[in-house]
Amino acid sequence: MAELHVELVAADRQVWSGEASLVVARTTSGDIGIMPGHQPLLAVLQPGPVTIRTAGETGQGTVVAAVHGGFVSYTDGKLSLLAEIAELSEEIDVERAERALERARSEADTPAERRADVRLRAVAASR
């Protein structure tokens, strides 16, 4: 089975790297699914969950990350997700994200509300 090599990188660290059979991300043009053999692509990432269907010796699994803007690039079997901020769903403290969402709503802090919402959606998508 053909696979694509995926690198999910945030401004401050490499978040995830490995082989995948499918990656789903939200771009400014809408949701996009990238599989091996996809035509070359360069797009702007919108804040939202990124779902990576992993492939490898241990079988298939799913990795979900909360991504807060950036770029996605695909060429020659290599997919790069370059994010301003990215967190794997298992790194997210749900209670803290819920408190941040409540606080942001009460203070009418739209960017903070958006970040907390993306974190919670990533956790929900990983379950």
Image (cartoon, rainbow, N blue to C red):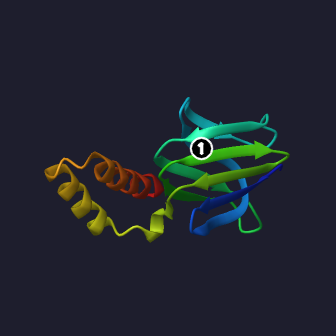
SS class of the residue under badge 1? strand
- Is residue 5 positioned above or below 110 on the image? below
Residue 15 in the image, given as x and y percentages of width and height: 59, 66
Amino acid on which disc 1 is placed: Val
- Is residue 85 positioned above or below 49 on the image? below
Residue 37 in the image, given as x and y percentages of width and height: 82, 39
Residue found at x 51% / y 58% = 65
Residue 20 in the image, given as x and y percentages of width and height: 71, 54
Count of numbered circles in the view: 1
Quadrant in which the C terminus is drawn: bottom left
63 and 29: which is toward the camera? 29
Residue found at x 39% / y 57% = 119
Would you say 4 lies left or right of 30 here? Answer: right
Residue position for label 1: 24
Would you say 90 lies left or right of 93 here? Answer: right
- Is residue 29 positioned above or below 47 on the image? above
The image quarter in which residue 83 lies:
bottom right
Q: Which residue of the protein is positioned furthest toward the top in this rendering?
A: 29
Q: Which residue of the protein is positioned furthest toward the left in this rendering?
A: 106
Would you say 105 lies left or right of 21 here? Answer: left
Residue 125 in the image, given as x and y percentages of width and height: 45, 52
Mark 1: few/some/many CA within 10 Å (<14, 14-19, 20+) = some
